[in-house]
Image (cartoon, rainbow, N blue to C red):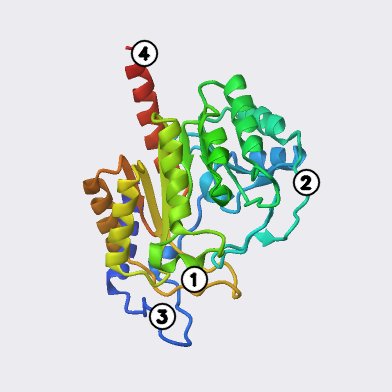
Amino acid sequence: DRKKEVLELSEKSKWVEYRGNLKRQKGERLRLPPWLKTEIPIGKNYNKLKNTLRDLNLTQCPNIGECWGGGEYSTATATIMLMGDTCTRGCRFCSVKTARQPPPLDKNEPYNTAKAIVAWGLDYVVLTSVDRDDLADGGSEHFAQTVSHLKERGPKILVECLTPDFRGDLSAVEIIALSGLDVYAHNVETVRELQRFVRDPRANFDQSLSVLRHAKKVKPSVLTKTSIMLGLGETDDQIQNTLTELREADVDCLTLGQYMQPTKRHLKVEEYVTPEKFAHWEKVGNEMGFVYTASGPLVRSSYKAGEFFLKNLLDKRKSEVKE
């Protein structure tokens, strides 16, 4: 382990000397800096889970390799994407396929998902989905059914729902917030000023804030969580103002990660933000009163260390309630 540590530190000393461009000049494409050239760790559970997903006709999250299987934090977690793999929106940072009328929902999915998750013996599960603007309730009932099946079969499993904005329909938010989940997550994705440039025109910052605010209003004990990608051309002031607005909306948990361009058709990376800069924002987030801030180049919105932390926090809160 010591050898590994020394090796990692020698690698890190190269980061400091890295002289490549971190900000994009007109017409160029940035090269990947050394701190992003890491192997994504794949837990030993990965293949087993992947096969079960296929057998049950469930959709895996695109970041499956890094979100799955306990690893060093020993919180066995999984991220499952509900409602198919086709989105009704086309955000400029996301490579999920889009269509106006995706295939209908699989009505057995909530039950099958719960059954699979309980069988895997997971501690923490993130349920996420594509946007389904084609459905009257945006799929909120489908989410809620999955949560209630899960909690029925495995009451100890902690459930986070990373939801769409349901076109600002707060009754849909309410259905999920009251479903028995532990963490209500919805991503604002970027600073206020870049929303129209980065997200589908049907999404916007105020609509996203209202989702997070409403979840907290109808279920004050629920933890709310959001995520921001850096490297899209935002300024420090814009990040600071965004964090301020999130705290004013009583958002509990925040993750900040590096935007990575999924294909040539998507938005180019404007800047590779250094690990030091991410550490700065983590410190700022903690000082501003977020219960939890995870900030780093490889942090995703469903983040294993975060789930480990949230599990401990939620367990502690539950035992306090019992006392």
Q: Position of residue 305 (x, y in %)?
A: 40, 42
- Residue at label 1? 197
Element under disc 4? helix
Three-letter code, disc 4: Lys
Which of the two labelled residues, at mark 3 and mark 4, occupies the earlier sequence position?
A: 3
Q: Between label 3 and label 1, give the one nearer the viewer.
A: 1
* Tag count: 4
Q: CA distance from mark 3 to mark 2?
A: 42 Å
Sequence-first tag of 3 and 2 = 3
Numbered disc in front, either 2 or 4: 2
Mark pair 2, 4: CA separation? 42 Å
The span from disc 1 to disc 2 (Cα, nearest Å) is: 30 Å
Residue denoted by label 2: 104
Mark 1 and mark 4 lie on one chain; the one further toward the N terminus is 1
Q: Residue furthest bottom?
A: 27
Q: Nearer the viewer, residue 246 or 125?
A: 246
**Callout in the foreground (3, 4):** 4
Residue in the picture at 66% in, 36% down: 142
For the point 76% across and 35% down, the residue is 107
The amino acid sitting under disc 2 is Pro
User: Is residue 143 visible to the viewer in this orientation of the structure?
Assistant: yes
Amino acid at circle 3:
Arg
Q: Secondary structure at mark 3?
A: loop
Per the rendering, the mark at residue 24 is 3
Q: CA distance from mark 3 to mark 1?
A: 17 Å
Residue that badge 4 annotates: 322
Depth-wise, is mark 1 or mark 4 nearer the camera? 1
Q: CA distance from mark 3 to mark 4?
A: 54 Å
From the viewer's perspective, tell me whether residue 148 is left or right of residue 12. Answer: right
| Looking at the image, residue 126 lies above or below residue 266 | above
Residue at the extreme top: 323
